[in-house]
Amino acid sequence: MVKNEYKYVMPNDQELIIDLAKGVFHPTGTSEVLIDAVSANIEQPGKLLDLGCGSGLVGIVLSLLGKCAGRLYASDLSEQAFELLKFNSNKLDLPVIVKQGSIYAPWEGERFDYIVNDISGIAEDIAKLSDWFKETSCEAGLDGTKLVNEAISKAPNFLNEGGKFYFPVLSFSNVTRILNHAGNVFNNVERLSQKKWVLPDDLKPYMSELAVLKELGYIDYEEKFGLIIWYTDIYVATSPILYSK
């Protein structure tokens, strides 16, 4: 019997095993790209929030890499994710404060040096067609911007002065809408990295549906050498303009 787990290779080549559970979003390549970009950008440890933590992979790895000052803070809407992160952190003897709730609801009165947003950000029709959300639901809106833009809007209320907000943008969402919104909330929005991916096999039978979503502007991809290419960008936003309630 194959155990439900995710293996992540640390920079020292040590293998980290994260347990997974039904009903909790499983880490993907985007999770690892996010870890790499955030880790490279954080120059000194600070108070760090893993927002939409799922199994806890992103926050746990960043903590093990010395990017957290003291405890890791993490939250997710899912009760299963809440329990799973506690289990994974206890297994690693990692100090963590984990809470259950929607986006920033559990963190009223708290401020952080770093917020790492790992909340779902793909068009809902893509989520329904793909294997990524077999274990959990996706309510990110028709163009995948609903939850990401809410997290961006309210981030200034939870950042310390000089704090940084990290967020992935997938081309299976309305990239322009997300970036325009981020530019209306923060003075500085910088792309840290980009990773291109080949269309997963499970989505190949749905090319006509993807073409419609692209025509609507909900997603984007390119056809190159007979392949369908999409991408994940990682951004960091600093110096807030707006303070939304």
Image (cartoon, rainbow, N blue to C red):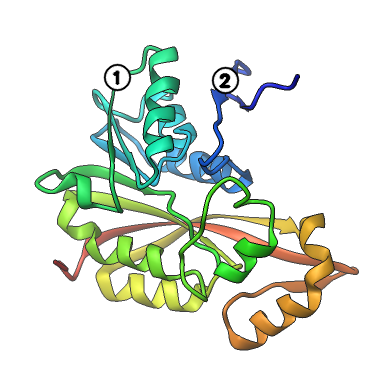
Residue 216 percent across, percent down from the top left: 60, 87
Tag 1: residue type?
Pro
Q: Which mark is residue 14?
A: none
Residue occupying image coordinates x 25% and y 26%: 69
Q: Are marks 1 and 2 in contact (CB under 8 Å)?
A: no
94 or 137: nearer the viewer: 137
Mark 1–mark 2 distance (CA, rounded to whole Å): 17 Å
Tag 2: residue type?
Leu
SS class of the residue under badge 1?
Answer: loop
191 up-or-down from 10: above or below = below
Mark 2, other Cα within 10 Å: few <14 / some 14–19 / many ≥20: some
**For residue 156, what is the image quadrant?**
bottom left
Seen as rendered, the residue at the extreme left is 109
Q: Which mark is residue 95?
A: 1
Residue occupying image coordinates x 23% and y 42%: 113
Which residue, given by chain and number where applicable, does mark 2 sit on?
16
